[in-house]
Amino acid sequence: MKLYFLLFAGILFLLSCSRKEQKVDAYGNFETTETTISAQESGLLLAFNVHEGDSLIAGDTVGYIDTLQLYLKKEQLDAQIASLRTQLPDASVQLQVISQELSHAKEEQTRTENLLADNAATPQQRDDMNAQVALLQKKYASLQSSLSIQSRSILSQIKPMEIQIKQINDQIARSIIVNPLKGVVLLKLAEPNEMVTYGKPLYQIGNLSQMILRAYLTGEQLSQVKIGQTVTILTDEPDNKDRQWKGKITWISDESEFTPKQIQTKDERSNLVYAIKISVKNDGTIKIGMPGEVVFR
């Protein structure tokens, strides 16, 4: 009886394995898109509140780099600009004096013309007034041009400083470490109070809610798949059971490669395979590196 039971169990096991071999079309491992977040400025990392396994959203402030020297440089430029602005001429006040003289001279010019018409003034007096008006007009134009040149010279010194302040403001903004995308921290690469340089990796983040199964097909299987196709993914469960997931093919390689060592394809005798990527929505069960099996139909 015991021998019969063992024989029956063995047959069921072999049948189960046979069914599984028939239905599985491809094998692969899960991965995710990993993004490395790097420092955008150089300096002392004063604060860095990131830990592996943390869930972050886009816009989270996770740390900042020392900006003291930037603030001091900005204050110095502000002071220099304020000093230069005090040197700008008050054109309206200086021109107003000559403008009043010119207005009075024109009134006298008109009065002289009227007197000359009544034979109460001489042509010489008229010519003198005309000359005086012309002289004042030239003085006004000359002063206006001089003040304009002086103002432009000072403003030309201020403009580069204002641009420097904008650059410093940008550097200060980039010294604040802001997480750019939603995901889970996979790897922490820096610690508070470390000196960091521009481009130094600080941490890696990945979106674990949407996993990618990279699987491999033989050349004969390529005709069975297309981008956008929905397939079934199987992952291992306790007690030799499988869990099914729905996935969508998002990428098919157009070049063959040698079979990766960790992958077993349907046709184990094939030396060359084609990689495909399948997007799978994850509830937290699927882990990076976890194996998966693909069923096309």
Image (cartoon, rainbow, N blue to C red):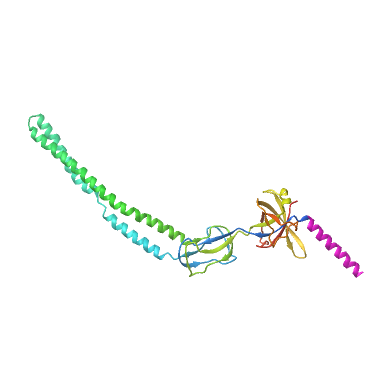
Which of the image's four quarters has the N terminus?
A: bottom right
Q: Is residue 75 left or right of residue 123?
A: right
**Secondary structure character of the magenta stretch overall:** helix
Which region shows up in magenta? 1-22
**Residue 49 placement (x, y as % from top left):** 53, 66
**Residue 297 placement (x, y as % from top left):** 75, 51
How many numbered dots are placed on residues in this image?
Answer: 0
Q: Is residue 17 magenta?
A: yes
Q: Is residue 234 left or right of residue 8?
A: left
**Residue 143 placement (x, y as % from top left):** 21, 46
Residue at horizontal 70 percent and vertical 55 percent from the top? 272
Examine the image and state in which quarter residue 7 appears: bottom right
Q: Is residue 236 left or right of residue 98?
A: right
Examine the image and state in which quarter residue 35 appears: bottom right
Residue at horizontal 73 percent and vertical 62 percent from the top? 236
Residue at horizontal 78 percent and vertical 55 percent from the top? 23
Q: Is residue 30 magenta?
A: no
**Residue 277 placement (x, y as % from top left):** 66, 54
Residue at horizontal 28 percent and vertical 53 percent from the top? 154
Which residue of the protein is positioned furthest toward the right in this rendering?
Answer: 1
